[in-house]
Amino acid sequence: MSAILALEFPPVSELIEWKGIFLKGTVFEVNKVVLLMWASVAIVFALFLVAGKRASRPEGLVPAGVQNVVEAGVDFVRKDIVLQTIGPEGLKFMPFLVTLFFFIMFGNLFSVIPVIQMPVNARIALPAFMAVIVWVLYNYLGIAKQGLFGYLGGILKPPGVPLGMLVLVAPIELVSTILVRPLSLAVRLFANALAGHILLATFAVLSTALLKSTIVGAAVPFALLVGLTGFELLVAVLQAFIFTILTAVYIGGALHPEH
Amino acid sequence: MLLNILAQQNPGELAEGLKTVGAGIVYGGAAIGPGIGIGIVVGNAITAMARQPEAAGMVRTTMFLGIAFTEALALFGFVLSFLLNG
């Protein structure tokens, strides 16, 4: 097919498999994705450090500048995520949820920044690891609150289910709570980041290829590329919000089992 | 029979071609359900927001949650189709 159009395209895997920069060939190979992960950590850390320093000084009572933006973000997580799903008990999970939200959001935002253009979550390692952390957390909370058999009993026998239906409901509930929740958390984040990245790359390559042959023909793909970049920006923030609110829902489900 | 012919570009490429056709069918089938599902979720959310505008914030948040749940299924299919076809 590429021979027909007389255009050379590198294989699709090069969109996400980057060459190593340091420590090539070992397990600890550092490539662009790893550097972006470190950059995301550094940005979140620096943001909260600057905002926190000002907040602990006397004039920090009236937020301004960086502190204002960070406090708006923290307030958003507090009101719309924690208080809506867990209630006042969840406020001790605020540091974890805020970190999750901001880290995933900055990791996804790298997908639309011009020179960088690579979402950190487009490789499954990071979403999978975060999903495992969330899984360990909500299972630990459930077991600590109700004991191992109480927790499993609560999953297998949801309140208000007649005995005859239990034969059907129990395995479904077990698989859903223990297996499907972390898997879907990881794959939802990973697939959204990957799909956005591939879409943007496809339309960019299409615009460039059409620009070389007909200049007018590149106008439509380019307009679509602009629209898709805006959409990808929305999806980046939305997926961070979804991951965080689902984590909060699972924590709430482990803490208040009588739902 | 027709599928066998369509899936071959050069003679002897049947397996490769069928893998690509399979990947297309996987995503096509995976996108139907979530498409309808997200339509239902958002439609009901719009109705709820029209009936009670002061609850629009909470309805919008729950709508995004519902969209994420159903969209995850379509994305499973998307990832699977890429896994099938290199």
Image: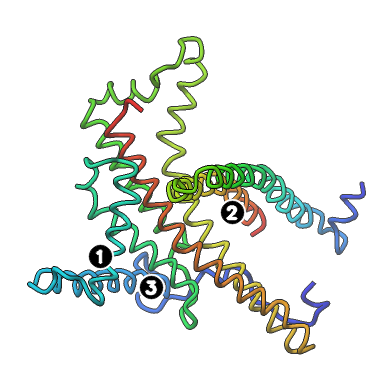
- In the image shown, does A4 or A78 lie closer to the viewer? A78
Q: Read off the residue under disc 1.
A: A71
Tell me if A41 is positioned left or right of A159 in this view: left
Whole-Å distance between the Cαs marked 2 and 1? 37 Å
> Helix, strand or loop at disc 3?
helix
Q: Residue at x 35, y 53 (%)?
A: A130
* As drawn, A60 above or below A240: below
A57 shown above or below B36: below
Q: CA distance from mark 2 to mark 3?
A: 23 Å
Question: Which residue is located at x 47 percent, y 62 percent?
Answer: A123
Q: Residues within 10 Å of mark 2 (few under 14, many from 20)?
A: many
Tag 1: residue type? Glu
Q: Earlier in the sequence, mark 3 or mark 1?
A: 3
Label 2 belongs to which residue?
B79
Checking the image for residue A36, the label placed there is 3
- Horizontally, is A106 left or right of A98 in the view? right
Q: Position of residue A67 (x, y in %)?
A: 23, 72
Say whether mark 1 and mark 2 are on the same chain: no
Tell me which residue sits at (33%, 46%) in the image. Answer: A134
The disc numbered 3 marks a residue on which chain?
A: A
Q: Quadrant of the N terminus of chain A?
A: bottom right
> Could you classify mark 3 by the number of other residues whose Cα lies within 10 Å: few (under 14), some (14-19), or many (20 or more)?
some
Compared across the picture, whether A179 is left or right of A1 comes to left
Q: Residue at x 75, y 82 (%)?
A: A7
Q: As shown in the figure, which amino acid type bears the numbered disc 2? A: Val
Given this view, does label 2 or label 1 mark the residue nearer the observer? 1
